[in-house]
Every structure is written in C-alpha cells, then in structure tokens.
Image (spheres, rainbow, N blue to C red):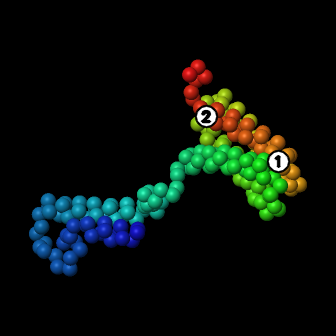
Amino acid sequence: MRLSLVFLSLWSVPSCSAFSFFAKSSRLSKTSLDMERRSILSGAFVAASTILIPSSAFADVSDGNTLPPGAAQFSRVVNIKADLANVYKRVSEHADEIDEKEWDNIGGFLRKLYSAGEDMKGVAKGMTADKKAKAEEGVKLLQKYAKAGEVPVNKQDAKGFLAVLDKETGLINDFFDLLSDVPDEI
C-alpha cells in the first residue's frame, strides 16, 4: 500500500524540464525557473511525506475490529462483568455436572478476571481523585479474591467458589457505581 502511494505521489509531480533529457532552452525566464523549482519541491514534499508517514496511519479504519485503548479497556471490563454472571449461574445451578476440564476453564476465567483489574485501573484514570482511590482499592481486593478463588477451583469446591464470586461481583458492581455520574436524588 505504501508503495502505491509513493507511485501515486510521484505521478502527481508535474513534468518539468529538470527531469527531461532534452532541456527546452537555456534562456528560460526567471519566473518559469521559479515555477519549476516550486513544482519539484512540492512533488518532493508529497513523496517524502508519503514515505515518512508511519504505517499505522494507513490502517483501514472501516474494518471496525479494534477499539481505541480506553474504549477497549472499558469493553473488557463490561465483558468480564457479563462473564462473571454467567460463571456464577453455571456453578450455582449445575455444580454437580462440572468436570475437571471445566474447572480448569474456570481457573482460566479467574486469571482473566485478575487481568481485568488492570483494565479497571485504566478506566479509573478518568475519575475524580476520591473515586479513583476507591476504585483502586476495589481493584486490589478484586485481584486478591481472584487469587484466593484458585483454592476452591483446585479443590472443585462449588460453595467456596461461589462465596468468592459473590465478593467479586460486589466489587465489580461497586466499580460501575463509581463510574456513574448520576446524582442520588434522581
């Protein structure tokens, strides 16, 4: 793509006698020489700017498969909240049906939940100082509970795991409450 842009920019450079093998006349007027220099310089500028632009600037925005960093962090936090509800429902309703492989997947979910704490810290950067402090405290607790959740998962203890999930769900809900700017009077 970059190569085609270089050719396009070189194609747009007006033809001038400086690039031809046969110079027109040695008696060119001063204004025509200035015009030729300007056209050469403008063409060189276009070519150089096309070559020097980073490749990320040529990304196809219409793909729609990536979000800006802040929006991606928020999206992952929203997704982890939904996943948390689904895991809670699965373990609470069908704990006796969960096999060893699924318990391993639940352990993977806990690691994903732990890393979502980093995304929550990124989202919290836009909060006021007092809310940010509360959010960071909640994130530390969430990560601590995610680590603690490994014990009941390894023992395949559904009741112990649900107790940990209750705490984590409360912390995630508290985080989203901190994001809300709606006053309590409404």
Q: Disc 2 residue type? A: Leu
Helix, strand or loop under label 1: helix
Residue at horizontal 20 percent and vertical 64 percent from the top: 36
Q: Is residue 185 above or below residue 114?
A: above
Which badge, 2 or 1, is on the more N-terminal residue? 1
Residue at horizontal 43 percent and vertical 60 percent from the top: 60
Residues at discs 2 and 1 in contact (Cβ within 8 Å): no
- Which residue, given by chain and number where applicable, does mark 2 sit on? 179
Q: Residues within 10 Å of mark 2 (few under 14, many from 20)?
A: some
Q: Is residue 92 visible?
A: yes
Helix, strand or loop under label 2: helix
- Which residue, given by chain and number where applicable, does mark 1 sit on? 161
| Residue 9, image x, y percentages | 31, 66
Q: Nearer the viewer, residue 157 or 65?
A: 157
Q: Residues within 10 Å of mark 1 (few under 14, many from 20)?
A: many
Residue at horizontal 86 percent and vertical 55 percent from the top: 156
| Residue 100, image x, y percentages | 82, 62
Residue at horizontal 32 percent and vertical 61 percent from the top: 46
Q: Is residue 171 above or below residue 4?
A: above
Q: Quadrant of the N terminus?
A: bottom left
Q: Nearer the viewer, residue 128 or 89?
A: 89
